[in-house]
């Protein structure tokens, strides 16, 4: 009996990935537009750093200019991936409402965890593919010196950041359930706050102390700082263990808490009739 239930949930899990793939394929033109937007954003940051060499920087400071270029490019590329995954997860309910399938999904005889993890898995796969395409373009257009990079540490940090990122995404996906009219705008606001406090284009030490305190509890801060240290300065895996531990701890707390809160928000939305597309 348990085996049949597990098989049923696994089929549903894969089904959500398949459905999300079909949605991407249906709206491929819009996805191409967003991919171009992400690519242009990353390249703009890279050329901004490269342009520093035209502003009177001495030749002896060329290494500083190159480090600045790498710092900004890594931040822009990581933010493209992290924000894309966050966006896709947090807009899971919005997608459902647009397609008119939200009521059917919520009535399906599957666990809500299966539904949410399926959406998260699809977002991760898609996010990795888009980040890889943009990364290849960056490598082709910029001469990046990554000889000191510790790729193993960067990948482990990257993987550890996945759990808290998904937890934040699921938390934000509750907003359209709570408010069909304004939930989407609030999701963009949350994304903007994360961009401000997480040190995407600057260390959080430059922020005023109230924002710096908020940045300390953002998982993206540890992800960006750790990956930068690994790629720019060869940070070892042993030295990165504190950041990895913090990210995993955040994930262990955020994912179950977000799923539980999502369940409470779902009950409320059903009781108040907030699942229909018109809100």
Image: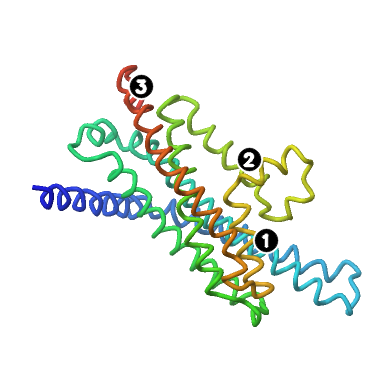
Q: Nearer the viewer, residue 195 or 148?
A: 148
Near mark 2 (Cα within 10 A), the count class, few <14, some 14-19 or many ≥20, is some
Name of the residue lying farthest toward the top: 272
Q: Are the two marked residues, 1 and 3, in contact with CB atoms closer than 8 angstroms? A: no
> Residues under labels 1 and 3: Cα distance?
44 Å
From the top left corner, tell me how far across and down residue 74 is, in percent. 63, 65
Mark positioned earlier in the residue sequence (2 or 1): 1
Q: In which quarter of the image is residue 50?
A: bottom right
Q: Residue at x 40, y 53 (%)?
A: 123
- In this figure, which residue is indicated by the disc labeled 2? 193
Residue 57 to residue 120: above or below: below
From the top left corner, tell me how far across and down residue 222 is, in percent. 61, 55
In this rendering, which labeled residue sits more in front, label 2 or label 1? 2
The secondary structure type at the circle numbered 2 is: helix
Residue 91 to residue 140: above or below: above
- In this figure, which residue is indicated by the disc labeled 3? 268
Name of the residue lying farthest toward the bottom: 147
Q: Which residue is drawn at 76% across and 73% down?
A: 66
The secondary structure type at the circle numbered 1 is: helix
Quadrant occupied by the C terminus: top left
> Residues under labels 3 and 2: Cα distance?
27 Å
- In this figure, which residue is indicated by the disc labeled 1? 44
Q: In which quarter of the image is residue 101?
A: top left
In this rendering, which labeled residue sits more in front, label 1 or label 3? 3
Mark positioned earlier in the residue sequence (3 or 2): 2
């Amino acid at each position: 009996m348990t085996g049949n239930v597990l098989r049923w949930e696994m089929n549903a899990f894969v089904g959500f990935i398949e459905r999300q793939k079909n949605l991407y394929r249906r709206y491929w033109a819009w996805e191409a537009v967003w991919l171009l937007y992400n690519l242009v954003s990353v390249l703009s940051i890279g050329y901004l750093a490269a342009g520093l060499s035209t502003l009177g920087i001495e030749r002896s400071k060329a290494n500083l200019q190159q480090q600045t270029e790498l710092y900004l490019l890594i931040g822009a590329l990581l933010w493209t991936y992290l924000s894309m995954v966050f966006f896709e997860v947090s807009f899971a309910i919005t997608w459902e409402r647009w397609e008119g399938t939200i009521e059917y999904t919520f009535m399906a005889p599957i666990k809500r965890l299966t539904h949410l993890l399926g959406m998260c898995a699809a977002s991760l796969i898609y996010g990795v593919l888009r980040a890889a395409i943009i990364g290849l373009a960056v490598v082709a257009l910029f001469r990046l010196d990554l000889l000191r990079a510790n790729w193993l540490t960067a990948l482990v940090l990257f993987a550890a950041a996945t759990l808290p990122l998904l937890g934040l995404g699921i938390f934000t996906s509750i907003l359209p359930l709570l408010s069909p009219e304004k939930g989407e705008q609030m999701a963009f606001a949350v994304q903007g706050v994360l961009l401000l406090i997480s040190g995407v284009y600057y260390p959080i030490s430059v922020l005023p102390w109230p924002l710096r305190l908020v940045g300390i509890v953002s998982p993206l801060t540890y992800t960006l700082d750790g990956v930068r240290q690994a790629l720019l300065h060869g940070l070892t895996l042993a030295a990165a263990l504190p950041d990895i531990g913090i990210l995993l701890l955040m994930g262990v707390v955020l994912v179950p808490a977000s799923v539980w809160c999502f369940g409470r928000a779902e009950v409320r939305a059903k009781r108040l009739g907030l699942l229909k597309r018109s809100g």
